[in-house]
Amino acid sequence: MTTHDQTPGVLYLVATPVGNMEDITQRAIETLGAADIVAAEDTRHSRVLFTRHGVTVKRLESYHAHNLESRTGHLVRELLAGKSVALISDAGTPGISDPGAVLTRAAVAAGITVSALPGASAPILALTASGFPSHRFVYEGFLPRKKGRRSLMESWKDEPRTVVFFESGMRLIKTLEQMGAALGNRKVCVAREMTKKFEEFLRGDIGEVIGELTRRGQVKGEVTVVLAPEGFTLD
């Protein structure tokens, strides 16, 4: 609980670029510089962004999947003591398939004001550039590594909405093969290196995309996959 002379601080969810470092808003830059604490998923990665935009951070702390248990309570206590906290992830909007969702829930439960600053989001970028129906879609985050993977894909057979999910480049071809076996030769878009120099949106039937990726060899990094509804065509 807070005392009468303590007004809780605000938790700011600050979107950062998914690739191109110029894709950050002026409001985000100002918020990062003004916050009492900036909580970052990878402090080394974040310092590069700060340097690029001339941001001087008052206090930088790590907040990632391996220190959630200790850092969540710590940051909530700082917020209740009146400190403002700006939360950023490695890329994109915090809280989307990353630890930020845990801190946000804890802050809401403690009665702390949460303010979300708009900005880049990989699922939305991939969806809008795919050319697939975007008026209704479902976001699946990262697919299960093993248990539940096949049943999830099979559930997409009757899914009328476009499906968006993240996948590792190392598992991408295998995932597309599993999708083809479960769903047939549906239309798919593989988005990689978004907003960077070699940005690419590889569109086509699942079989066509598998063939192209196989010819190239190993796919590096993380990609965003967009699966079109049954019967959709780009023609």
Image (cartoon, rainbow, N blue to C red):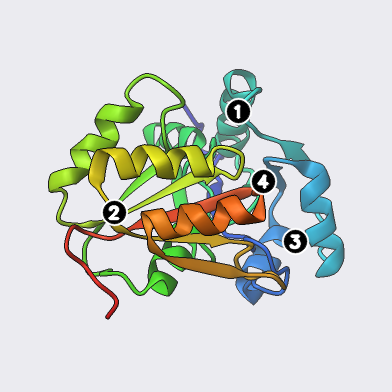
Mark closer to the observer (1, 4):
4
Identify residue for label 2.
185
Residue visible at 64% across and 32% down? 64
Task: Please tell me which of labels 3 and 1 falls first in the chain.
Answer: 3
Q: Secondary structure at mark 2?
A: loop
Distance, label 3 to label 4, CA atoms, is 40 Å
Distance, label 1 to label 2, CA atoms, is 36 Å
Q: Is residue 32 left or right of residue 118?
A: right
- In the image, residue 177 sits, relative to residue 129, either above or below, namely above
Distance, label 3 to label 1, CA atoms, is 24 Å
Identify residue for label 3.
33
Q: Amino acid at mark 3?
A: Gly
Residue visible at 44% across and 54% down? 225
Distance, label 2 to label 4, CA atoms, is 22 Å
Task: Please tell me which of labels 2 and 3 falls first in the chain.
Answer: 3
Mark closer to the observer (3, 1):
1
Q: Neighbour class for label 4 at 10 Å: few (<14), some, many (≥20)?
A: few
Q: Amino acid at mark 4?
A: Gln
Please report contact status of discs 2 and 3: CB closer than 8 Å, yes or no: no
Task: Please tell me which of labels 2 and 4 falls first in the chain.
Answer: 2
Mark closer to the observer (1, 2):
2
Task: Please tell me which of labels 1 and 2 falls first in the chain.
Answer: 1
Farthest bottom residue in view: 235
Identify residue for label 4.
218
Please report contact status of discs 1 and 4: CB closer than 8 Å, yes or no: no
Please report contact status of discs 3 and 4: CB closer than 8 Å, yes or no: no
Residue 76 in percent (x, y) is at 55, 32
Q: Secondary structure at mark 4?
A: loop
Q: Neighbour class for label 2 at 10 Å: few (<14), some, many (≥20)?
A: some
